[in-house]
Image (cartoon, coloured by chain):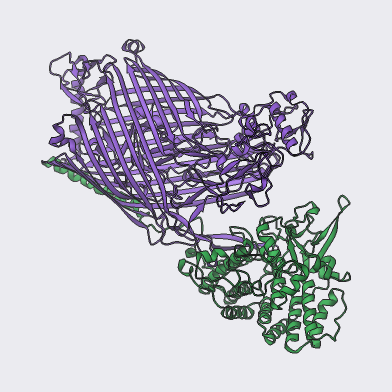
Chain colours: A purple, B green
Amino acid sequence: MNVSFKLSLFGAIILLSNGLIWAQERVVSGTVFDENQEGLPGVNIILKGTTIGTISDYNGSYTVNMPEEGAVLVMSAIGYTIQEITIGARAVIDVTMTVNVEELEEVIVIGYGTRAKRDLTGSVATVSQKELSAIPVISADLALQGRTAGVTVTQNSGAPGAATSIKIRGTSSISAGNEPLYVIDGVPILSSVQDITTGSSKGDQMNPLSTINPNDIVSMEVLKDASAAAIYGARGANGVIIITTKRGKLGAPKLELATYQGWQEVRDPYELLNATQFAHFVNESSFNGGLGRIYSNPSSFGEGTDWQDAIFQRAAVSSYDMTLTGGSEKVTYGASGSYFQQEGIIVGSDFKRYSTRINVDAQITRKLKFQNTLLASHVRSMKVMTDDNSAFDGGSITAALSFNPMLPIKFENGNYVDKNYQVSDEGAIILADSKLQPLNGNANPLLKNLESPSEDRLSRIVENMSVTLQVSENLMAKVSLGVDFSTSREDQFTPSLSRSGGDAFGSSGTNSNLTRLNENTLSYSNKFGIHDLDAVIGYTAQKSELSRMTTNAIRFDNEMLGYYDLSLGEGVSLNSNQSEYTFLSFLGRVNYILMDKYLFTITARRDGSSKFGANEKWGFFPSGSLAWRISDENFIQALHFFDDFKLRIGYGVVGNESIGPYTSLSPLINNVTSFSESLAFGYEPFFLSNADLKWESTSQLNIGLDLSFFDARVNITTDVYSKRTTDLLLTTLVPLYTGFGSVLGNLGDLKNEGFEFSVTSNNLVKKFKWNTSFNFSANKNTILSLGDRDSIPNSAGPFTNESWAILVEGQEVGTFYGYEFDGIVQLDDNLDAIPKFVGETLQPGNRYYRDLNNDGIISADKDRTFIGRAQPQFTVGLDNNFSYEGWSLSLFFQGVVGNDIMNFNKFLTERQTPNNNISLEYYANRWTPTNPSNIYPKVTTTAPSQHVSSAQVESGSYLRLRSVSLGYDFPTIILESLKISSGRIYITGKNLWTLTNYSGYDPEVSHFGQSATDFGADLGGYPNSKMLLVGLNLGF
Amino acid sequence: MDQKDLNITFKQGLRWIGWSFLMVLFSTCQDSLEEVPKAFLTPQNFYETAEDALLAVNASYDHMASGTSNRDFGGVYFNNYWVVQALASDEGYASGANNPQYSLPLTDFTWDANNGYLEDVWEDLYKTINVTNIALQQIPIIEMDEDLKNRFLGECHFIRGLMYFELVRMFGDVPLSLEPTVDLSTISISRTPVANVYAQIIIDLELARDQLPWAYSGVDMGRATRGAAGGYLTKVYLTLGEWQNAIDEANDIIQSGVHELMPNFGDIFKIENSNNSELLFSVNFTLNNDAIWETSQFNVRVLPVELNKNSLSWELPTQYLYDLFDPSDLRRDVTFKVEWTDSSIGETYTFDPHIFKYWDEAAEPNASSSSSDFFNLRYADLLLMKAEALNELSGPTNEAFELIDQVRSRAGLDDLDITLNKEAFREAILLERTKEFVFEGHRWFDLVRTGKLKEKVLLAKPSVIVDMSRHILFPIPQREINVNPNLVQNPGY
């Protein structure tokens, strides 16, 4: 067949069809009913083979204008079986849709393929678009919170766009990261903030997932057990989250607009002392310290300044989304554009995202299909530093907690009060040149927020292009090329004024990261007789390249230009870096179903990673699982009760390779010495190389049960699992005479055991609908071995310079460690009998600690013990949805139980000496001779040194109404009068109610972010907010 | 399947092959999992040129000086080494303001195997050795000028010999490693007997002596010389009691005429006289504008807090030491001060004796970070060593008197009474060393070598208990024994 002939034939067909289309037209109309014979809205009605079609309205009615010769209508709707209706001569066609056997027919994305939910043998959870869109969130990971059993999402910080922490089935690693692998439309994306940004700006680090517009997502699947995650081999140990974006749908172009506007506020500010109370506090401290009273008339200071009020604001959030979908049988497209902006509840902080998505699917020939996914976004965020982890700077929250309430925000001359000055009895501000020093080193929190800009900008493109060839009826070949490209710029400038007199400091960093991915798979599926076989094999190659540059400068001659001209500073320093790594994999999976009852899955992946030692480049990760659909056995069918009853069991090994490239090598670093006053450089190895360095391995056994009954209205999934991680990446000490101190090696061992239960129930299904989903999960983590060490304390925390959590065999990762607070010394106590630190003198009103070894002395090595746990014992989620006619109401509760928080804020809010403001709770209940508190010490000017103890540990359990939402879908009358196809208006409240005993701003906090060893601390964290918003969705 | 289908399948197949080809193209650039870092060097892509060889040698010097790449900052001679020598003797005491858990036990002879200062010295010495071992392994295979190569190797042999000499004197038997550490194969080696360590030290220092020049010019001044190697060989033989060898090595240097005493004692320490001809070896520090950690720590640690600068009174001389000086001894007021006048405000501060000799007030008025070098080995030391060896070999000869009197006359003192007997001369030498080398990192060594640790320390610190079976060696750091149980602790620890 020659080309010209083909072309002419093609032309002929076009001409012919055009002629036919223009020939004659007719109208078909009717109503689509659901299983209860009620009108079914939202059904796609397409003339088969064309783009002609419509969507049923609120009453289920439809009208299609179509060419005379049109023969077949295709009717589809989510949750219903697709129907093809032969039109014949009819002008009115009423159709009753039949319910798809509920969610059992739901298709689940499992990585390199899909699977009917009912045929799963591993543990896979899915979060639907409806659940995703229930709470407006900045990033999709937050939408997972409380939705699935076994997935614990912690919003480490309330800063807009800040990184979260996600743990799937507990903490599997100590130092190699616990975050899952994210795969967006087939591309494993970089989700570690270290890969995406330089981390050189102030404030909370950005969440790499905040670059993805959550409204672009149609579903998220969580691969939890080894059987499911083994297809991702060396990256599967922390679980895998597969994100699928919305694609085009057959039908006429449909435009949807969605917007919401919201307002956020801080949830629960501290009650601190006002100026009058603070004056009393200073007087009493001074008196107790043996000094005279400072303030003769405390009440003359009145209320003073509420520094929290100064930095918190009611913050707006708004989102605008436009989505276009449509397509013919040959080409479908889905495109979106969106703008999201959120002010922070702390003055000076915000987040903005501009994003677009273009997804195209084209059936080029009968056998050749092309797919393209393109996600592009630009994010920019102004950040504020809220926590005090650098001595010269302070953070805005710690400063707001600390600042003297007697001070005004500004001096009379209009300049900001820069330091935490003392105030004289006459009310004068005592400036620094006096003998009286400022209270503490913090700078005015408002000044810091307004005058010390820190700005992150991040652009990202995720692209995946694939060609699929249907080689034969059963065999499909697919080649895809993917890209994850991001580039960031982080700037910050701190003028000298907001450094409490220190030198101005500025920095600027830029990072770019390009990941290229090529995947090649062959899929085979066939049913013959009682056999159902589905298999995939593949080869993939991935390469990531990172390059970055950071520069900083200190002491500026002219501070006006800030970070836009760092060359005005002295001591400009520059750092540049480049790194890359390669990942090669061979993968395979076989799903086999015998007699629709016995299901088997075998998965294996062989991964090669350049990151590991020369002797350990390749790893093999096999898994196997089987399931027995007992409901298909006669003895169960005879009960006429179960729609599905499936027992699953799976075992496999997966890995964790989240370490940096070149970790196994011995980099040479330069050092510098001098001869005759002239610098001379040298080179030497910085680390000892380890050619045997390899991934952490996690083996996991999972046993699960899927139940469905009452006509599939109730669905239960429950799993128990046992995970064991070996070859933990830990540093081990080597003798100093080698010239090195330690080397990173594979030692140590830990396990996670847990239970998960989830149920969804359609309680009412008539006109008034009510459905409920509930999930519960419990996990127990245990360290089995730390290699050659008995225990590893974490690095020293703030205020006391003591470590506060420890890794010990037999305990959990995230075990708090310190002294046991034993009480307050009372007036009639025998001071000699109370155990003390060496050199410590105690007085009535001071804290003392438990002498665990009863030697009469409190010592760091003998009297510290386990005082709390950072990991929750269980988590719950409960979602209820009600709908009646166009109205819908949803209530979503989420909670974690059994975890503790190491509240470092207490070193400020319960400080005995007047170096900063304190909490009213403490001051009102402090020890005095007449109020012999056994909890709160006295106030004084010379207090014993502070220690990490159980006095700072609080329960972090909470239950919160994560969201409540009331919505109304416009009825047909309105839709028709507005000439739109759909419309919805809603009002949503987020975090409106929280049950917790935690004294800080919010129990959802982790000052040290994702770190496994430092999890669960609060120190001036950016508080989570509560939010109220109204939204409107319109479809055209 | 009809003809048309077949045809399409075939063409699609071709396309499929095309795609596969593209894929292979795409993946050829990444088919290797070998890591080839671009942003840093590794031993695999370094050590190829003469310039690389120089950088490898310089790395060893850095670990003797500021140790810029150390986790704790500070190399061997940055501070802890001389602090230990001063505190664990009659020479100095710690105020306790800095690391009291380490500095006070050194002062009062209650140190144990967990002492962080001792661990730092141990760590820095061995870091230097490993870096030197790398250079000694890599430089011989670099194609470069042979003379320069020999000089580089000579510098490395000198540094390694010196490091082991410090180790063997402080810790006795020590792990002896002459190859760079590249894997964990050496983590369980045992201690090598003192005699074998000394044998290696002599090999290294002799190689160095034979390969090094007498002097350098320009910015190479400060590198190890023949005089440095010969001077330390003298000290090695003196320590081993090989008197004639010590005299021979000393003579080699004296006869060269390269080194001489500075006419004025105070000038030795002036910044402008860095690397002066009295110095057989000094570790150079600088206050160069770009330098952050390359500065000397003497002033910041030993000058009095009363100066209201960044000086901290951490280590001070004992009153006993101060009182040993005759007021006419020109060294006294260079070495110490008990009062100081701030000329800018005309106010005078008085204090207990503090070490002032390292402060070149005119050159560096701010009295904190400094360019002042560490004076490892001076010509005065060589003269006194030779005098000591002569006395030990054949009593106080005229030549021995002449040597010690050179040092005394510069200090403005009369010649020694020539009627002194051998024992009195021995005592005179030790006293001269006491006054000549205050806080120069020799004291504990001198007292151990002469067997007078207990006797002298009790004079300065009457309340301490010195155990001559224990305090003549420092303990192997406990950390090392924890990691390698094959290491046996020194007696008494």
Q: Residue at x 28, y 15 (%)?
A: A767
Q: Quadrant of residue A554?
A: top right
Q: Nearer the viewer, residue B429 or B247?
A: B429
Q: Residue at x 67, y 83 (%)?
A: B241
Q: Is residue A723 left or right of residue A156?
A: left
Please state the horizontal and vertical placement of residue B158, each as a whole percent of the image: 62, 75
Q: Residue at x 33, y 38 (%)?
A: A756
Please state the horizontal and vertical placement of residue A368, each as a whole percent of the image: 23, 39
Q: Is residue A531 left or right of residue B338?
A: left
Vertically, is B52 above or below A831?
below
Q: Residue at x 45, y 55 (%)?
A: A786
Q: Nearer the viewer, residue B152 or A52?
A: B152
Q: Nearer the viewer, residue A944 or A110?
A: A944
Q: Nearer the viewer, residue A678 or A876?
A: A876
Quadrant (top left/top right/bottom left/bottom right) for the N terminus of chain B: top left
Q: Residue furthest bottom?
A: B394
Q: Quadrant of residue A123?
A: top left
Vertically, is A319 above or below A946?
above
